Structure formats: structure tokens, C-alpha cells
Image: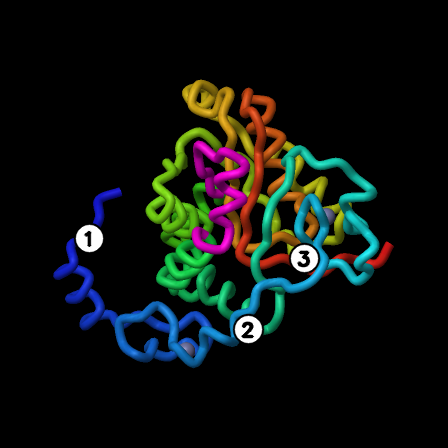
Amino acid sequence: MRKRSKTGETLLNILYPRRCPVCHDIAAPRGQRICTKCREKLVPVQGPRCCICSKPLEDPQEEYCGDCRRISHHFKKGIGIFPYNPIIQNSLYQLKYGQRQEYGVFYGEFAALYAQKEIAQWKIEMLIPVPLHRRRQEKRGYNQAEIIARSIGDKLDIPVNIRSLYRRKNTKPQKELNPSERKNNMKDAFCIRKSGTESVNGKNILLTDDIYTTGATLDAAAQCLRNAGAKEVYFLTIAVGRDRPV
Ligand SMILES: [Zn+2]
Ligand SMILES: [Zn+2]
């Protein structure tokens, strides 16, 4: 992606001042991606987390969350950064449905810093945003997972691949479904383009998305990439839901 010049950035900031992903007002001081006073309201998950999906755990003795104990995933492991509290919920809602693409850039930059160590440890060679179905993307005008991936890729100098994986089923929104319906809904939802197999073959891939709930979407995408020859698939999401009681 072509980088905008400094002057271009400044001009854009005057015409369309960046909004803060926490208070949704124009970020203060102007030009920052988040208000100084709002930054402290964004607190990543603290305390014990699932070794695979990074969900916060009630019991510090446990290694895995209920879901990861019950089922094995196609991805190897991943990180969700923020607990899914009302601040994050509202912020991600505006990113997805409110045309606040700049929030995705902010979260991507945050993620690049926050997960830099893991991304290096996992030897990530390629970022793949979870694709939207073509019709949904046309309606929205962008894919929030792609904005996040590009922002991470820019910071850490990792290529972003949006061509190889695509969504062939225009699935129902996962939030309307229970866990088993979610899994079913995602069955065969993703597909690899013929030319994509070569690009993902033998690579360590990081999938990006806005939220991890049951992991059904990321798992379906990971399965597709593994079938196409990807070495290992990891994930990074901006928010992560709570563990469900078994
Ligand atoms: Zn603010
Ligand atoms: Zn887990």
C-alpha cells in the first residue's frame, strides 16, 4: 500500500479530524489517534489466560478454557487483546458499522506493539484478514479485519494477503447463533483461490479479526489455510470474550 505523505496526513487531519475510539469525539490533542485521557480506559486482559485462545480464566490453576478443553482447533494459538467490555464493544461496533475506519488503524498499531514478541516468536510471514463475503464488503465499503491487518503489517513490515482466502458463503451474523449453530454456520464458509495455494504453502500465517468469541470463524479460516498447505496458523483479535461455564 502506498504510504501517504506527511503533508497529505496533516491535510486529511484538518478536513476529517480523527475520532477517538473510546469517547468517539475528535481525539485530543488533535492529530492523535486516541485522547490522552481515554488511553487509560483501554486495559488489555489481565491475569491468567487460556494457553491456546488467550481467553481470561476464572481459575488460575487451569491451563485451558472450557472450549479449548472440549475441542481441538485448526489454528495453533492466538491472542485477543482487550476484554469484551462495553467500551470495546461500542468501539468495535463503530469500526464495523459506523464508518470509523481510523479505529482499525489505531487498534492495528496498538496490536503491533502489544503482540510484537509473539508475532516474532511465531515467525509470522504473512497476515491474512478474515474475509467478508463480497456482497457484505461491497455494502460496508471495507473490511475492518483488513484495516487492522494493514496497520499491523505497516508497523512490523509483514505482507498482507487478501487475495488467497475468500468467503464463499454469506453467513448469518455469528452473534445471533449458539456455539453449535456457529460451527455449522461456518462449515465450508471459506475457500482458497487456485492461485492462493502457492502463496500460503509452507508459511506461518497470522489471521486477524476484530473479536474472538467461540473461535468458530477463525477456526474455519484456519482449517482452509492448513488444507492449502499453510505451515501453522495463529490469530490476533482486538477483543476476546469470556470463558463459558462448562
Ligand atoms: Zn477520547
Ligand atoms: Zn481457550
Residue 95's x, y, as percent? 44, 62
Q: Which residue is denoted by mark 2 in the rendering?
A: 87
Residue 200 percent coordinates (x, y): 47, 25
Q: Bounds of the magenta span?
A: 112-129
Kindly indicate whether the residue at mark 2 contacts the one at mark 3 (C-beta within 8 angstroms): no
Quarter of the image containing the C terminus?
A: bottom right
Image spot of residue 88 (x, y percent): 55, 68
**Tag 1, which secondary structure?**
loop
- The residue drawn where x is 43% and y is 70% is 21
Q: CA distance from mark 3 to mark 2?
A: 21 Å
Q: Circle 3: is it few (<14), some (14-19), or many (20+) Cα within 10 Å? A: few
Task: Kindly state the secondary structure of the residue where label 2 is placed.
Answer: helix
Amino acid found under the numbered disc labelled 3: Glu
Q: Quadrant of ligand 1?
A: bottom left
Q: CA distance from mark 2 to mark 1?
A: 30 Å
From the viewer's side, name the closer residue of 34 and 165.
34
Which of discs 3 and 1 lies nearer the camera? The answer is: 1
Q: Residue at x 66, y 33 (%)?
A: 74
Q: Which residue lies at the image location 54% right of the left edge and 47% below the top edge? A: 236
Q: As shown in the figure, which amino acid type bears the numbered disc 2?
A: Ile
**CA separation, marks 3 and 1?**
39 Å
In the image, residue 189 lies at what x, y percent? 59, 36
Asked if residue 195 is positioned above or below residue 239 in the image, the reply reads: above
Q: Which mark is residue 4?
A: 1
Question: Badge 3 is on which residue?
Answer: 176
**What is the count of numbered marks?**
3
Question: Measured along the vertical axis of the image, is residue 25 above or below residue 203?
Answer: below
Q: Does residue 127 appear to the left or right of 19 in the view shown?
A: right
The reply to whether the C-beta atoms of the residues labelled 2 and 1 are less than 8 Å apart is no
* Left or right: where 129 falls relative to 3: right
